[in-house]
Amino acid sequence: PPDGPTDGVVVAPGVRFSEKLWTRLGGQMQETEKQKQRERLSNMTSFPDIPTSLFDSTFRRDAVWKQRELRLRKGYVEHLESLQLQRGEDQATLQDKVLEQVAGVYKLAEDEAVERLAKHTSELQLRANRLRPSEPPCTAQSKAVVECYKANSSNPLACADAVSLMEKCANAARKEAVQRIKPTAG
């Protein structure tokens, strides 16, 4: 209150205690203890008296060292960044080389497969050509047997020699066909 007494101890904004009440409550002792504690703390944290010239030179030296350290850090960071970029480029280059090698392996495998296919195709064509004779076998002997039977229709046993020759020719043609079916080594 503005009209109230102005003497006493302000405990909180708008709250005053009389000196007598304050002493009774032990406020003064508490206040004295707090003051002593503040003094002890300030004594412990205060800096010793250092001559200004020594302080300035030490501060200057520390500032120079800090600048050097910052420059070194900046250089180190730049170096790390360049290494990281180089690593990325090296990794991309390595990946490209690996892809080229893989593509080369696939190309070789494809070339080998095409080569084997071409070889197999040519072997099959040769086999097919060997299987097809240019003219039917034993044509002459077959004609001779037919002529003999026409001429000797009443006596077919007279054609036994012609039939025997036809049989020998047929057996030889069969053996030859089997030889053509079997693939040649090499």
Image (cartoon, rainbow, N blue to C red):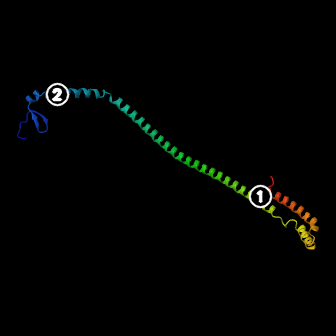
Which numbered dot is residue 30?
Answer: 2
Which of 112/40 is in front? 112
- Most distant residue in the front direction: 154
Q: Which residue is mark 1?
A: 123
First in residue order: circle 1 vs circle 2: 2
Say above or below: 136 vs 8: below
Say above or below: 117 vs 156: above
Residue type highlighted by circle 1: Glu
Q: Position of residue 133 (x, y in %)?
A: 83, 64
The residue shown at (60%, 51%) is 99
Q: Quadrant of residue 41?
A: top left
The residue shown at (38%, 31%) is 58
Which numbered dot is residue 109?
Answer: none
- Most distant residue in the left direction: 3
Classify mark 2: helix, strand or loop. Answer: helix
Classify mark 1: helix, strand or loop. Answer: helix
Q: Position of residue 19 (x, y in %)?
A: 9, 30
Q: Position of residue 68 (x, y in %)?
A: 44, 37
Q: Is residue 72 left or right of residue 46?
A: right
Which of 120/79 is in front? 120
The residue shown at (67%, 55%) is 110
Q: Nearer the viewer, mark 1 or mark 2?
A: 1
How far apart are the alpha carbons under marks 1 and 2? 115 Å
Q: Quadrant of residue 53?
A: top left
